């Protein structure tokens, strides 16, 4: 790797630059569109930059639709999903990894079934279940089915398996309960991986479209990905506002990603790399 | 010792209970219910009559189901290999520009991965605007007025391209993980043997990445077969159902026509296809290895 | 006045654009006019998404207190148990009687002998024309009005004349995939030939179906009209003066009135009923109405019902504002008032009301209903030349067949 021939370097630089440009261009174009007055989006000639810069599209979007409310819903839902998923997955993974009980492998296998079956195919009975519980159009109804995440358990178990048994044995000998051992011995060690999985879970929950789409029936319970599909009707075909709404919807997760880029990377690497 | 075993089992039960309860309620039970519903005539909330295998009989003779399956395969064909290959190329590039004090790799990685964190509707809003027939930037640059999403030849490829842009970052990360797991010594040894450029890739990088590639292909196939949101939002399954995928057909049957029994049969058939193809692909690829 | 005494009525509408703005004005007017009831309205996405949400919310007991619906969906919604019937006594208490509404629309609000909706309007398909372009093409009489057009050939010739004399498109109409204009036009022209689309649970249009679809497609194939345009693209083509005619519902009237007043529309326009192209002058129409979701397990309290009907009565009595949206009001005291009779441009197409046809009855029929949703996938394809008319209809029937055979669902 160190002694790359020069023509390889040229090819690498050229490919990297053009791919990177191709990948950010749509976002930059959306940004550029959102910063112009509405009439400029349909001018007969193409201008890459706004001729008249304005944030009117943003102020209109925030004032007109339910965007702030949708952002709040998304944040609340994603946060709840993350916290609950982490809690129940850590406990389950710890049991699967560190405790001995009959039928452990069978149970783990059953839990991993969900990796194979598409959640999407279960929409009708899930709708009925949630309806039966009276949770249609509630936060609980949006959150609960999303906390079943076998991947997270899989990753945590892999991680716990790799921890030398001495730690656990020492703690258990002291008479500590397993929950206590998980909390005070294993959790501190797995800070990085918990963070990473939490961020990944948060992003996935923030972006989930299909389930809220089915379960939410009123405008003020919508999450942002769902609300954005309504914006055509709220604003008409006004592309500056649509792009502003899109970028507002993207901003929190994009920011979270950019701030936590290293941890997101580690998390996904852990989720996938361990399998490889 | 025996008592310790028992307390351990008890603790395990307590620790597992919350997850297992959620799992049973929101996964196992719906899975069993889907099977049962598929044997009934039902609306969205009411189960009316047990009809045996009638729904499956309808399914076998239903051209709409088969064409939706064909469309699902069409989408998978257009996405699985490109997403895997491009993910590999991007990972190699990021790796190439990382380390030795080079910051470029991290910027590249950010650029390639950023679309992955966008909600689907943000992605589709941007794609819709860029491909708008009269004032979209793509048509303006090409000097044409194509209605991409209702074009018979282009609707599915355009959805595939948008999907590749949106999700390739995940595959890139998988390959990056694979690359980071290759011991440095292997490269050093190869360099001592005089291996350069592509030879290094062929003899060291590629064999080491093969397991990751297989995993990526299997995961991607399953992910591609499960497509719904992209086509639902961008093309609404058109023109005339040529981009309506199986999950979309299931959704329409269940929620717009309120034929939950038949929709459940579609879901069962679909699950069988996904599981079978996923397993088949995994087995085939592992054998080759 | 104690805050607690205010009844809040949650309403869902599918009205967007000009209709949405007008309904909002009516709601604001109502909220300002009294302080016992406050209506809060939510606009959901028009068409299939709206009805899917309404149905699922109602069966889950999470529906709104009031919804605007299309009367063409009544067999589907009332028959499916999604709506709550309203008794004559309940209406009477709010000062409304069945006889107050135009008979056709009132009849459309009944299902198995009970009223499930209060009709608001009727909106037929009409023919908009650009007087500047039509004039250059020699299609206007001395008074500047469209000369009568009778017969398919005459209409086709009119489109051709505009195209040849002015270089602008002869006509425009939404024709992209998943659009409904073609269904409305096709259904109108079939009715002009005496054929319903569906009768007795079977497709009943026979050979006329393909012939009519081919005739419409020929406008697009000959280049008089542009294929594949979505709704905003086709209306803005007409508003920008780039098409001689537009076939569309009356709901674009307010935009034309507004644009003319604001000076953004720089041509004179006229509106005519859909011409008689075959045996009679039948024209597709639908109606909006107010309906109360059944909200299973959560029956409506009497005071809430009174509040809901108070609002409905207010809108009925103030539906002159709704008429300004191009619609023909269903409330007779308003519809038959001198003010509405004199209202322009509505008076130009008032004659259309005599010839309207609705979607035929059936649980699968109606605006963006299961059958129309399927039609909207296949019928636009021949206009773009993507399928032959025969092929499009064959596929339409093959997919829709299952609906016709199915028992009406109880949601």
Image (spheres, coloured by chain):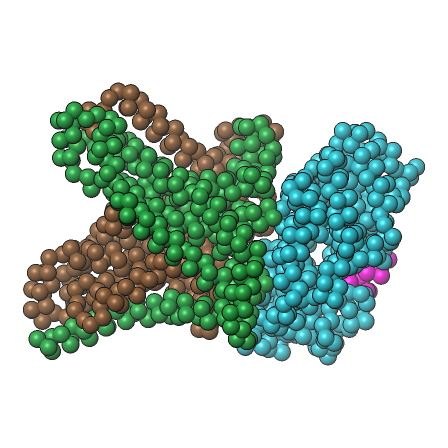
Name the residue: 53% across, 32% down: B138
- Position in image of residue B108 (x %, y %): 32, 34
Q: Is residue A69 among what the camera can see?
A: no
Task: Check the image and report above or below for C385 versus C318.
Answer: above
Q: Is residue B223 among what the camera can see?
A: yes
The stretch drawn in magenta includes residue A34: no
Which chain identifier belongs to the brown chain? Answer: A
- Position in image of residue C366 (x %, y %): 69, 61
Q: Residue furthest right?
A: C142
> Residue C337: which quarter of the image?
bottom right
> Residue A158: which quarter of the image?
bottom left
> Residue B288: which quarter of the image?
top left
- Which contiguous range is marked in magenta? C330-339
Name the residue: 54% across, 47% down: B243
Name the residue: 85% across, 61% down: C336
Query: In terms of depth relative to the viewer, which is nearer, B36 or B123?
Result: B36
Residue A59 appears left or right of C344: left
In the rendered structure, the colour chosen for chain B is green
Magenta segment main secondary structure: helix
- Position in image of residue C22 (x %, y %): 68, 54
Residue C384 appears left or right of C98: left
Point out the image quarter for the C terminus of chain B: top left
Task: Check the image and report above or below for C116 versus B165.
Answer: below
Which chain identifier belongs to the cyan chain? Answer: C
Name the residue: 59% across, 30% down: B144
């Amino acid at each position: 790797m160190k002694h790359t021939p020069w023509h390889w370097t040229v090819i690498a630089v050229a490919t990297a630059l053009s791919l990177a440009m191709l990948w950010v261009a749509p976002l930059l174009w959306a940004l550029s569109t959102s910063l112009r007055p509405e009439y400029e989006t349909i001018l007969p000639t193409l201008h890459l930059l706004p001729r008249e810069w304005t944030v009117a599209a943003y102020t209109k979007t925030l004032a007109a639709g339910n965007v702030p409310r949708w952002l709040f819903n998304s944040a609340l839902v994603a946060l709840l999903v993350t916290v609950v998923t982490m809690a129940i997955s850590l406990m389950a993974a710890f049991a699967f990894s560190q405790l001995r009980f009959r039928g452990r492998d069978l149970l783990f296998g059953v839990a991993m079934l969900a990796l194979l079956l598409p959640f999407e195919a279960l929409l009708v009975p899930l709708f009925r279940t949630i309806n039966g519980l009276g949770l249609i159009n509630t936060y609980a109804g949006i959150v609960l089915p999303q906390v079943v995440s076998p991947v997270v358990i899989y990753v945590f178990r892999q991680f716990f398996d790799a921890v030398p048994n001495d730690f656990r044995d020492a703690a258990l000998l002291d008479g500590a309960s397993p929950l206590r051992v998980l909390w005070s011995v294993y959790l501190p060690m797995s800070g990085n991986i918990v963070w990473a999985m939490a961020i990944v879970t948060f992003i996935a929950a923030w972006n989930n479209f299909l389930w809220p789409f089915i379960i939410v029936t009123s405008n003020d319970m919508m999450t942002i990905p769902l609300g954005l599909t309504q914006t055509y009707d709220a604003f008409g075909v006004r592309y500056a506002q649509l792009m502003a709404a899109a970028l507002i919807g993207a901003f929190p997760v994009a920011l979270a990603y950019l701030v936590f880029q290293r941890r997101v990377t580690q998390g996904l690497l852990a989720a996938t790399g361990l399998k490889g | 010792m025996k008592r310790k075993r028992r307390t351990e089992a008890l603790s395990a039960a307590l620790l597992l209970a919350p997850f297992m309860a959620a799992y049973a309620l929101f996964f196992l039970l719906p899975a069993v219910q889907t099977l049962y519903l598929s044997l009934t005539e039902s609306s969205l909330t009411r189960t009316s009559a047990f009809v045996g295998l009638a729904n499956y009989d309808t399914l076998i003779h239903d051209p709409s189901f088969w064409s939706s399956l064909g469309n699902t395969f069409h989408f998978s064909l257009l996405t699985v290999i490109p997403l895997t290959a491009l993910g590999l190329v991007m990972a190699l590039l990021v790796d190439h520009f990382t380390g030795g004090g080079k910051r470029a790799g991290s910027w590249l990685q950010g650029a390639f991965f950023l679309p992955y964190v966008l909600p689907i509707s943000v992605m589709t809003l941007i794609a819709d605007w860029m491909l708008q027939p009269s004032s979209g930037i793509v048509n303006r640059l090409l000097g044409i007025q194509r209605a991409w999403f209702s074009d018979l030849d282009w609707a599915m490829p355009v959805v595939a391209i948008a999907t590749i842009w949106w999700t390739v970052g995940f595959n890139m990360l998988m390959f990056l993980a694979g690359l980071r797991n290759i011991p440095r010594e292997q490269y050093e040894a190869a360099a001592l043997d005089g291996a350069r450029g592509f030879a290094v890739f062929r003899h060291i990088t590629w064999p080491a990445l093969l397991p990751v590639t297989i995993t990526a292909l299997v995961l991607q196939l399953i992910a591609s077969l499960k497509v719904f949101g992209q086509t639902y939002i961008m093309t609404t399954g058109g023109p005339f159902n040529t981009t309506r995928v199986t999950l979309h057909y299931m959704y329409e049957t269940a929620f717009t026509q309120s034929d939950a029994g038949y929709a459940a049969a579609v879901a069962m058939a679909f699950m069988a296809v996904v599981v079978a193809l996923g397993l088949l692909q995994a087995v085939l690829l592992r054998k080759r290895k | 006045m104690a805050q607690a005494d205010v009844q809040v009525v949650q309403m869902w509408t599918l009205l967007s654009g000009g209709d949405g703005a007008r309904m909002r004005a009516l709601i604001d007017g109502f909220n300002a006019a009294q302080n016992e009831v406050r209506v809060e309205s939510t606009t959901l996405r028009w068409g299939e998404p709206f009805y899917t949400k309404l149905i699922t919310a109602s069966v889950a007991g999470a529906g709104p207190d009031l919804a605007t619906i299309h009367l063409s969906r009544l067999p589907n919604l009332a028959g499916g148990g999604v709506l709550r019937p309203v008794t004559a006594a309940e209406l009477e208490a709010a000062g409304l009687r069945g006889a107050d509404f135009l008979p056709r629309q009132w009849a459309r609000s009944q299902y198995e002998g009970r009223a499930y909706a209060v009709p608001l309007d009727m909106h037929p398909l009409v023919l908009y024309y650009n007087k500047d372009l039509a004039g250059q093409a020699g299609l206007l009489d001395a008074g500047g009005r469209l000369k009568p057009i009778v017969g398919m050939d005459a209409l086709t010739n009119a489109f051709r004349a505009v195209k040849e004399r002015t270089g602008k498109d002869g006509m425009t109409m939404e024709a992209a995939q998943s659009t409904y204009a073609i269904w409305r036009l096709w259904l109108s022209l079939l009715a002009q030939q005496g054929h319903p689309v569906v009768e007795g649970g079977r497709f009943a249009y026979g050979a006329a179906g393909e012939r009519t679809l081919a005739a419409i497609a020929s406008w697009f194939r000959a280049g008089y009209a542009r294929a594949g345009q979505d709704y905003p693209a086709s209306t803005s083509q007409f508003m920008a003066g780039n098409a001689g005619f537009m076939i569309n519902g009356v709901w674009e009237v307010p935009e034309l009135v507004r644009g003319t007043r604001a000076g953004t529309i720089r041509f004179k326009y006229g509106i005519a009923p859909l011409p008689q192209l075959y045996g009679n002058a039948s024209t597709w129409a639908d109606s909006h109405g107010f309906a109360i979701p059944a909200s299973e397990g959560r029956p409506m309290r009497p005071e809430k019902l009174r509040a809901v009907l108070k609002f409905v009565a207010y809108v009925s009595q103030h539906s002159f504002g709704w008429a300004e949206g191009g619609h023909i009001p269903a409330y007779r005291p308003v519809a038959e008032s001198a003010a509405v009779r004199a209202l322009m441009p509505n008076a130009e197409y008032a004659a259309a009301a005599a010839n309207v046809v609705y979607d035929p009855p059936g649980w699968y029929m109606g605006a963006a209903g299961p059958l129309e949703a399927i039609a909207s996938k296949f019928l636009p394809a021949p206009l773009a030349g993507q399928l032959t008319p025969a092929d499009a209809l064959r596929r339409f029937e093959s997919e829709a067949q299952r609906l016709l055979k199915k028992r009406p669902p109880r949601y």
